[in-house]
Image (tube, rainbow, N blue to C red):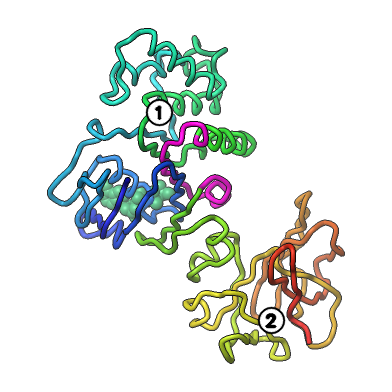
C-alpha cells in the first residue's frame, strides 16, 4: 500500500535522511525506532505530505504521492496524526474534538447527523471517555487528553495513522496502559500505523515490525524478536536491549575467544557478519549467568548491584570491559566488590545451553 524508494531529505547542506527503502503492508503496525536526531520525525513529515523529499519517492496505492517534483498535500491523503503535545483546542469539549474531523476532514467527512453521532460515540467508547465527553481540555489529565487526540485521529477511519512519540508526555504507568490500549485499538480497527519512538520498550511491545534508524539511515527492519535476538549491526545490538559487545577474536566461523580471557571460548549463535567482522561477540544483559569464581572462566568484579524488584542489575568490571548483567532475584546474590564468574546462556528459553567454561 505504501512504498518508499530511495528517499533522501536534505535541510540545506545537511542530510537528515538517506537511502530509505521501505514497504508497508496493509494493517501493519510499524515502529520507527532510533535516537534523537536520527530522522524519525523527518520521515513522518514526508509520509504526511508536509514537504517534498530531495530525492526518491513515496507511493500510496501504486501512485506517486511525493517526489522532488510532486507533492500530494496532507489534506488529500487519507491520513491522521497524533502528536506528543496532544494539540487540543481549549475552547472545544471532548465530544466536539472528536466530531470535528467528521465535519471537516475530506475523507472522514459525513453529513448524516445520525452517522456522525454513532461514530463519535463509538470512538468515545473505544478510548474510554464516554463519561467525560462534555469536559474541556483544561479539565482533563494528560492521559485523558492523549485519548481525545487518539479518538479524533481514528474517527475519520484513516487508512494510515501516523503517531509521533504519542506517549512521551505521560508518566510511566500511564504509558504502559496506553500501550495496551493503542494495541487493542489497532487490532480492532486494522488501520496501518506508523509509530515513531525512541523508547525501545514501546517498539518491542507494540509493533509488528520495527525499523531501527541511526544517522538518517535504516540500520535494520524486522520483527521485534528478530531485532532483539539477531541484531544485524553493532549499533542495533547496543541500542536495543542495552547489549554488551565483548571484544576478542573469531578464530574461525564458530569459535570466539574473548580478548581478556584466552582460556574461554564461545560458539556462534547466529551472529551477524558485520559484528563478527569487527571481532565482537554480542551478549544480552539477561544472557549472563553469574557464579562463584572457578578456573578457566571469564571473571569480573561487581561494581554496582541495583535491586529492581524483579531483577538485580549488575555492572561488572571484567578485564577492560564494563558489563551489564540482569539477573533473576532467584539466583545467588552478589555484592559490590565480589568476584564472580561470567558464563552465557545461548539457545532458547526452552532449550538453554550454558557456554563459557571448559
Ligand atoms: P527527535 O527524536 O529528537 O525528535 P528525530 O529522530 O525525530 O529526533 P528529526 O526531527 O527528523 O529527528 O531531525 C533529523 C535531523 O535533521 C536533526 O539533526 C535535526 O537537527 C535536523 N533538522 C530537522 N528539521 C530541520 C530543519 N527544518 N532545518 C534544518 N535541520 C533540521
347 falls in the magenta region: no
131 versus 334 height, above or below: above
Q: Say which of 337 and 255 sits in front.
A: 255
Q: Which residues are magenta?
A: 186-207
Q: Which residue appears farthest toward the left when viewing the image? A: 69
Q: Which mark is residue 153?
A: 1
For disc 2, the marked residue is 319
Which disc is residue 12 wearing? none
What is the spatial separation of the Cα atoms under label 2 and label 1, in whole angstroms? 53 Å
SS for callout 1 = helix
Above or below for 114 versus 280: above
**Which residue: 85% across, 83% down?**
294
Q: Residue 58 location in percent, x, y?
A: 25, 49
| Mark nearer the N terminus (2 vs 1) | 1
- 200 part of magenta stretch: yes
Residue located at (55% from left, 46% from top): 202
Task: Judge: label 2 CB < 8 Å from ligand 1.
Answer: no
Q: Position of residue 95 (x, y in %)?
A: 45, 14
Q: Callout 1: 10 Å neighbours few (<14), some, many (20+)?
A: many
Q: Does 78 sit left or right of 193 as displayed?
A: left
Point out the image quarter for the C terminus: bottom right
Amino acid at each position: 500500500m505504501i512504498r518508499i524508494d530511495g528517499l533522501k531529505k536534505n535541510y540545506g547542506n545537511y542530510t537528515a535522511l538517506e537511502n530509505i527503502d521501505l514497504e508497508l503492508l496493509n494493517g501493519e503496525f510499524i515502529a520507527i525506532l532510533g535516537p534523537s536526531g536520527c530522522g524519525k520525525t523527518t520521515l513522518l513529515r514526508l509520509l504526511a505530505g508536509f514537504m517534498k523529499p530531495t530525492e526518491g519517492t513515496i507511493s500510496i496505492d501504486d501512485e506517486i504521492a511525493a517526489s522532488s517534483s510532486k507533492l500530494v498535500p496532507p489534506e488529500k491523503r487519507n491520513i491522521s496524526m497524533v502528536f506528543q503535545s496532544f494539540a487540543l483546542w481549549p475552547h472545544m469539549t471532548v465530544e466536539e474534538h472528536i466530531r470535528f474531523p467528521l465535519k471537516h476532514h475530506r475523507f472522514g467527512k459525513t453529513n448524516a447527523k445520525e452517522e456522525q453521532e454513532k461514530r463519535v460515540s463509538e470512538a468515545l467508547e473505544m478510548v474510554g471517555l464516554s463519561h467525560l465527553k462534555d469536559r474541556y481540555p483544561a479539565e482533563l489529565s494528560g492521559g485523558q487528553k492523549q485519548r481525545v487526540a487518539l479518538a479524533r485521529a481514528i474517527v475519520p477511519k484513516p487508512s494510515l495513522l501516523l503517531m509521533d512519540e504519542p506517549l512521551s508526555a505521560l508518566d510511566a504507568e500511564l504509558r504502559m496502559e496506553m500501550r495496551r490500549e493503542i494495541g487493542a485499538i489497532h487490532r480492532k480497527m486494522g488501520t496501518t500505523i506508523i509509530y515513531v519512538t525512541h523508547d525501545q520498550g514501546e517498539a518491542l511491545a507494540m509493533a509488528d515490525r520495527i525499523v531501527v534508524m541511526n544517522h538518517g539511515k535504516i540500520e535494520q527492519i524486522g520483527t521485534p524478536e528478530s531485532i532483539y535476538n539477531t541484531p544485524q549491526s553493532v549499533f542495533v545490538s547496543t541500542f536495543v536491549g542495552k547489549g554488551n559487545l565483548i571484544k576478542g577474536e573469531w578464530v574461525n566461523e564458530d569459535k570466539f575467544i574473548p580478548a581478556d580471557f584466552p582460556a574461554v571460548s564461545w560458539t556462534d549463535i547466529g551472529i551477524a557478519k558485520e559484528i563478527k567482522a569487527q571481532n565482537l561477540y554480542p551478549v544480552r544483559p539477561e544472557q549472563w549467568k553469574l557464579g562463584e569464581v572457578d578456573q578457566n572462566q571469564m571473571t569480573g568484579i561487581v561494581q554496582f548491584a541495583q535491586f529492581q524488584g524483579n531483577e538485580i542489575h549488575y555492572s561488572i568490571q571484567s578485564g577492560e570491559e564494563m558489563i551489564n548483567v540482569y539477573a533473576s532475584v532467584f539466583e545467588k546474590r552478589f555484592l559490590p566488590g565480589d568476584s564472580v564468574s561470567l558464563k552465557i546462556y545461548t539457545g532458547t528459553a526452552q532449550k538453554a545451553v550454558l557456554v563459557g567454561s571448559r
